[in-house]
Amino acid sequence: MIVSNNPQATEQNNQEQTHFGFKTVDKTQKVNMVKDVFQSVAAKYDIMNDLMSMGIHRLWKRYTIDCSGVRAGHKVLDLAGGTGDLTAKFSRIVGESGQVVLADINDAMLKVGRDKLRDLGVVGNVDYVQANAEELPFPDNTFDIITIAFGLRNVTDKDKALASMYRVLKPGGRLLVLEFSKPTNELLNKAYDAYSFHLLPKIGQLVANDADSYQYLAESIRMHPEQEVLKSMMEAVGFEQTTYQNLTGGIVALHRGFKF
Amino acid sequence: MPFAQLVSSGLERALNKLLQLDPDSAAKLRKLKGRNLQVRVRELPWPLIFHFSDEISLGVVVSEGSESARPDCLIELNLETLPLLQDSSQLSALIQQQKLILIGDIYVAQSFSNLIKELDIDWEEQLAKVTNDVFAHQTFHSAKSVMLQSQDFIQQSREIWAERLTKEGAVGINQQTLDQFSEDVVKLRSATDRLAARLAILEKAHKA
């Protein structure tokens, strides 16, 4: 196992390889490995999220929606939308004149999301698209808002994905990236590490009967670019007025960038 | 933890739960579908925005001045003004007194106010769903009697206190009491005179 603390460096040093948690794997392999992880956790994704975050992930997502400036008639892309938490809310706000596209690379997650949203009565203005964030199958300047919540760290080529998002965003539109990040307090960082690497896989084993996937989750969080790095990555592909807000001591950060 | 989102989440859940309990609310809510209402209570740090669809989505206005801050209707007021909104005839007066700022379509605010005011929830039926009909009926019957008795008691107390506080209290004493007092004084004087005479006799006898 090769451990790298700088995911960008890993990607830059070897264009054919990337990280999968703490492992370094071929880029072509990562897509399938991530797919396997989410195929495995899809059915219990919501319950595990609630357990792991003690329900706080719902507040982080609400904060994301509050920061999105969404209103009736908007066209929203909920990328890596998984089980559709953000889509459900967006769909109600954009109304009949708007549209929400729930996109995920993983068909199992998409199916769970679609069933859940239909059960909730969220129909009519929601489309479901199986799509790779790196090559979004939409025309240029399509969406007013793009969100990607807890999805970017699983993307193989993040720069390519950010550029793709920039392309499909309308001028004046905004991208919101909600993702695990680096806690700002050293003590919290240590406690969070202990929780992630010791408790999290055990909860995963107990509830979803899948310790490996949750071990990957913890590792992928550590390998994800920290706040300032992600901000620079967004700026590099063209986003402007890029800012981020640490949530719950930096365990999660919400990055926001505009296309003008 | 995003505290504002915690509060808005709790409020949203409570509002939607209440609306679900009233079968007529869906039709009233339909009138507001696609509209939004921003409420700025001056004592609260964050304005709230209500989005109406098949249910109410409640958000916090994070970035002032952005597009999200352009609602169909905006209400700004103090907490103390909130109960006064129940009387719609007072709206103009409140606006003139600058206790209420209302920008946009007043219909949205009025419809929302009516939606909440006219909520008609059969609590007995709701309790029956989790217990049974007999228990729910008896509980509500008892609760109603206790409430009626309490209301009677409050009404009676109010009347008693109103009487005590408004009726003139007697400052002087009446004639009968004065006559009785005088008679008692005369009796006491006679008794002390008799005692004094007896003491004088005893004193004389002792000296002799």
Image (tube, coloured by chain):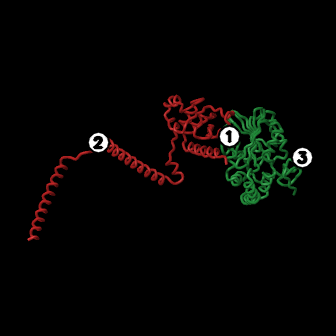
Chain colours: A green, B red
Depth check: A143 or A175 in front?
Answer: A175
Depth check: A143 or A91 in front?
Answer: A143
Against A4, residue B38 (above or below) is above
Q: What element carries label 2?
A: loop
Is residue A96 visible in the rendered image? The answer is: no
Depth check: A35 or A72 in front?
Answer: A72
Categorize mark 2 by other alpha carbons within 10 Å: few (<14), some (14-19), many (20+): few
Q: What element carries label 3?
A: helix
> What chain is tagged by disc 3?
A
Give the label on residue A12, or none: 3
Give the label on residue B168, or none: 2
Against A193, residue A109 (above or below) is above
Mark 1 — residue? A66
For residue A7, side relative to residue A86 (left or right): right
Distance from the alpha carbon under mark 3 to that under mark 1: 35 Å
> What chain is tagged by disc 2?
B
